[in-house]
Image (tube, rainbow, N blue to C red):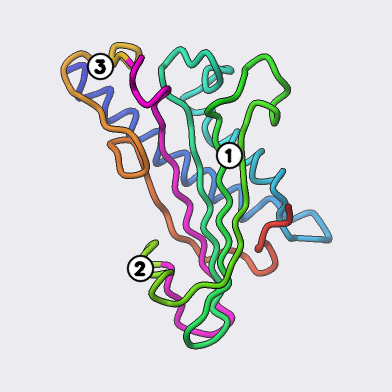
Amino acid sequence: MNDHYRFYELKSKIRTSAYLAASMVQQLGNTRTDKQLTKSDLLRVSYASCLNLFHTNSMFAPYPFGIYFLAHYYFVKKNDDGNYQYQRVWITTGRGSATTKLFDGMNSGINSLTMTSAQVEAIDPDLICNNIGEERLLIKCWYGVVNGGKDFKKSQLGLFILEPTFGDKGNFSYSLVITPKPGLFPVKN
């Protein structure tokens, strides 16, 4: 009974993190003249969205729960019938330290390129746009396990019977596709 509740709670928290990130992304530029988001904006969004599980610096090393938070933002904009502008921003609290300043303890990166419709569909079919100039954003959040799971003990999460799986397709992952407000993307580095 305890494991079932804890599993549900962790799944609910990662889903909530994705929705919190989506909401913050949409609202962040409301009071600014330049609406375009920056990597620093997404670092703040990702940090704030994971606080529903990690109430302290527990998302950083030494990882008392044995897990850390990851968020990927996949932006696409349809340029013409076969091509898309693509940008992926990834952010993680993994491999960081709780003793450093907030953004020194987080890792991130940006990849930008042009993709075909087939490549975009392989990422997620819901990213396919109907009209030229249309934009979509996939927000994918999940918990990763420290050291590839070598030192992980499920009791750290309050689990005793069920075996959790981790990663972007694990038990504790959630994906959400939205249409971002115009002008927010692509993210400035």
Label 1 secondary element: helix
* Residue at image coords 27%, 31%: 8
Question: Separation of disc 2 and disc 1 at Cα?
Answer: 24 Å
Q: Give the mark nearer the N terminus: 2 vs 3.
A: 2
Q: Pointer 1: what residue?
A: 46
Where residue 73 is drawn, which disc sits there? none
Q: Does the magenta stretch include residue 128?
A: yes
| Separation of residues labelled 3 and 1 (CA atoms) | 26 Å
Query: Quarter holding the N terminus?
Result: top left
Q: Distance between the residues labelled 2 and 3?
A: 34 Å
- 103, above or below 31, in the image: above
- 153 versus 143 height, above or below: above
Residue hosting label 3: 159
Q: Can you give x and y, in whole percent of width and height, for residue 164 in the image?
A: 25, 27
Q: Nearer the viewer, residue 81 or 185?
A: 81
Q: Which of marks 2 and 1 is nearer the N terminus?
A: 1
- Residue 159 is drawn in which quadrant? top left
Label 1 sits on what residue type?
Answer: Ser
Q: Residue 181 location, x and y as percent?
A: 62, 65
Quick one: 164 or 3, which is closer to the camera?
164
Dot label at residue 125: 2
Residue range highlighted in magenta: 127-152
Sequence-first disc among 3 and 1: 1
| Disc 3 secondary structure class | loop
